Image (tube, helix red, strand yellow):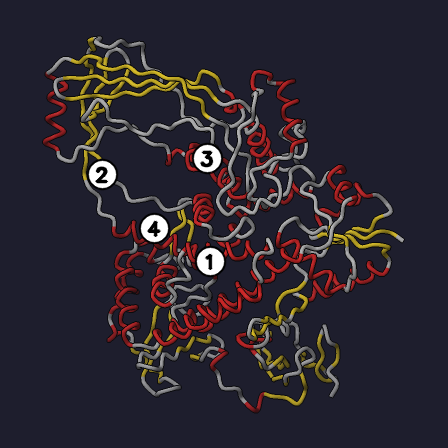
Amino acid sequence: MANLLLIESPGKLKKLGQILGPNWIVKASMGHIRELANDGEDALGFDLEGTQIHCRYEPRDARAKKVLAELRQAVKQANAVYIATDPDREGETIGWHLQQELRLKNPRRVVYSEITPAAVQQAIAHPRTLDQALIAAGRARDCLDKLVGYKGSRHVVWQLNNGAKSMGRVQSATLHLLCVREREIQTFKPEDYWSVWVSYREGFKAFYRSKPTAQRRVGQASSQPPAESSDDASTNEDSKPKQESERVTTQAEADRLVAIARSTPHQVVKVEGKVVYQSPPAPFITSTLQQAAGAKLRFSPEKTMKVAQSLYEAGYITYMRTDSVVLAAPFCQAVRQYLEQHDPTNVPQRTAKHRAVKGAQEAHEAIRPTDVNRVPPLAASADEANLYELIWNRAIASQCCPARLQKTRVVTQSGTAFWEARGQVLEFAGYTRYWNNLSADAQLPPLQTGQVLQLQKAQADQKQTQPPPRYSEPKLVQLMERQGIGRPSTYAPTIKTLRERDYVQLLQGKLQPTALGLDLDAALEKLLPDLIQPAFTAQMETALDAIASGQQDWQTYLTSWHRDYFAPAIVKARQAIGSNDFKATHLKATHFKEAQLTPSQQNSSAQPEKSLTKTAQTKTVQTNPAQQVSKVACPSCGELMHKVPSRSKKLKANHFLKCIKPGCATVMFWNSKAKKYELPYSQRTPDPESFTDYPCPVCGALLERYTYTREGQAKVMLRCSLIENRRGKCKDVAFFQGKDGFWSPKFGVLNT
C-alpha cells in the first residue's frame, strides 16, 4: 500500500508528486474542509457553558463533502497518512479538522517551508504529531471572530439601519484607523508659510536656518534594519521629502530675510563631513513584501499574495505568510558563495542582524528564493517574474555589505541670517546594488571655512501646510503590523472585506472611507469603543499567541472574555441604540460628516452618470424631514414612514423606508417585482398557507412554497422555511414543480 500525503492547495499536487514518486498518493483538501455550523444562539455554531466551549463543525459546502468522500477512499488505500498542510497556525488547524473528519488515529504531521526535494524529504523523514497548542489558538480565533462578527453585526450594526452589513474584530479596528485619518483630513486647516533659500554661483543651494547649529534628521546609519517607511517608500515619488528652510510664518519676515541675503555678503562658516554606513534591510516578511510590491509594482496586497502563492507552489520561494526575518543557515551560506563568485567585494565579514517586529510569531523563515542560483527572470508570467525578482534582490541584499556614504553639511552666513546645504555621495554601493533605498546623490562643491561666496539668487516660496495623506493599501498593511492588528494571513483579506462592504473605496491609489464607513465607525465609537481601538485588538492577538505557545487555555480565555467584557458591552450598546440621545446625536453627526465630505465621497456609491447637482439634491432631501414623508404606513405602529436615501448598490431603489417614531425604527425595502415595499425577510410574519407537510432533507424544518416568474410564466418551488438556513447549509434545497410532482437536482423526487 502507498503512503498518503494530505495538503491544502491543488496547485502543489504535480510538484509534490514529482518529488515523492509513485509510492505516494498526494491529495488536496482544497483549503478549509470544515467550519463552525450556523446553528444555535445567533447561529454561532458553538455554546459557551461556564468555562467550556462546545463546538459543532460541518463541511463548508457541497464541494467539501465531495472532497471528504474522496479522501476517505484514499485513506482506506494508504499504509500511513501524512498531513502536510501549510506551516502556520491556520494550516495546523486544517490538519486537525482532517484528522477529526477522516478519523485518523496517528497521522504524521510534516512541515516544510519550501517545496524542494531536500526540504520535503527532510520533513517526511522527521514527522511529528499535530501541535495541540496551535490548534487551540486556531479554534480560538475562529470562535472569537464569529462571536464578534455575528453578535456584533446582529445586535448592533443591523440595528443602525444605515445599510452597514457587518463588523469584525480586525475589520472594525482597521476601519477605525482609516476613519481617524479621514477626520484629521476633514478638520485640517491649512496655514501659509514661506520657505526661504539662496543659490550661489559656486553651484549649490542653501536654505534658511535661524541658528548655525540647527540640526535636521537626514537619515542616520544604523546596525538595525531601516524602517520600511524610509525603505520602500523611497520608490514612491509622493513620499520623498522635499528640501525646505525652517518655516517662516509671515510674508514680512520672509521679505526681511530675502533683503538680508541680497544686501549683505555671504561666506562659509562651517563645513562638516563624515562617512556613514547604511545597513542592509531585512529580508521580506509578509507585510514588507506587500508594501514593496505595492510601491514598486503597484500590486494590491491581495494580488501580491496570489502571485506569491503561485511562486511558492511552483517551488520558487519559501512560504509567504510569515513574520520572521530569519534566514536558514544553508541559504545564507549559499548566498555567500554566490557573492564570492559574482560580487566578491560585497561579501561582509559579518552579516547584519535584523530584529523582528514586536509580537512576531517567527514560526519559520523569512520569504526567500529556494535556490539562490535561480536568478530572475524565471517564471511563466510577468507578474510572477517581477515579484520573484523583488524577493530575490531583497534576500541577496540582506546578506551584503553596508553601503558607505559621504555626507556633507555646509553652513553659510549673510548678516544675521544662516543658510544650510546638505550633500550626500554614495562611495560604496554595497547592498544597494540589489536593493536601492537611498536618495540620489547630491554633491556639494569643495568649500572651505571663511570662503566668500557669490550670491546668484535669493527667494521666498509661499507654501501651505498639507493635511496628513490617506493610506495606500501597502501603507495600511504597514500600520496594521505596527499596531498589532491581525496577523500576516489576515492583512489582505481584511482590506478586501472593507472594500467589498463599501466601507472604503480606492481613489487615486489611496483608501478613503465612504460615508457609510464613516457613519458606521462613528456609531461603533460610541457603542463599542474598546473593540475598535487598535490596542484592544492587539491585546487579543497577544492572547491568541499565548494560547499558541501553550501558556493560556483557549476555552478559559474566550469564555471569560465573553462574560466579563463582550456580553455586557453588547447589552449596553443595544440599550444605547434605543435611547433618544443616541438617535439625536448620531443623526446630527451623520449630517455633519456629510457636510464635510468631498463630492466624490458623497457620490461614492452612486451611478457614474449622476451629477453633483443630483448629489446636492439627495443631500437636501436628507436634511429636510418635510420632504421625506412617504404615503406608506408603518406595519408596526401605523405612523407614516420616511424615505431615507441609500447609496447601497444592492438595493433595488435609491432609498428605503424607515419609521422614525421613538422605539419603533421599522424599515421596509422596495420589491421591484411585486411593486411594493416589504419588510426584511427576518421581520416578515410567515404565511401559514405557504407551509407544506414535507420536511427539509437537510435540517428537518418544514418546506415552504415560493412563487416566482420565469419566462412570463408563474412557477412554484419548495424551499427550506428557515431563512438563516437558506443562506447556509440549506441553500441547495430547492424542489421544482414537474409533471410528476416536485423534484430536486440534488435530492431527487420529493416523496409524497
Q: Earlier in the sequence, mark 2 or mark 3?
A: 3
Mark 4 vs mark 1, CA separation in Å: 16 Å
Q: Confirm whether residue 286 shows in the render.
A: yes
In this view, the residue in front, 395 or 107, is: 107
Under circle 1, the secondary element is helix
Q: Earlier in the sequence, mark 1 or mark 2?
A: 1
Residue of label 2:
464
Kindly identify the amino acid type of the residue bearing the numbered disc 3: Asp
Residue of label 4:
181
In this view, the residue in front, 485 or 232, is: 485
Residue count near mark 2 (Cα–Cα under 10 Å), binned few <14, some 14–19, many ≥20: few
Q: Nearer the viewer, mark 2 or mark 3?
A: 3
Residue in view at x 54 percent, y 77 percent: 41
Mark 4 vs mark 3, CA separation in Å: 21 Å
Kindly identify the amino acid type of the residue bearing the numbered disc 2: Gln
Under circle 2, the secondary element is strand
Kindly identify the amino acid type of the residue bearing the numbered disc 4: Arg
| 408 up-or-down from 547: above or below | above
Q: Confirm whether residue 609 shows in the render.
A: no
Residue of label 1:
171
Q: Nearer the viewer, mark 4 or mark 2?
A: 4
Residue of label 3:
232
Mark 1 vs mark 2, CA separation in Å: 35 Å
| 672 up-or-down from 261: above or below | below
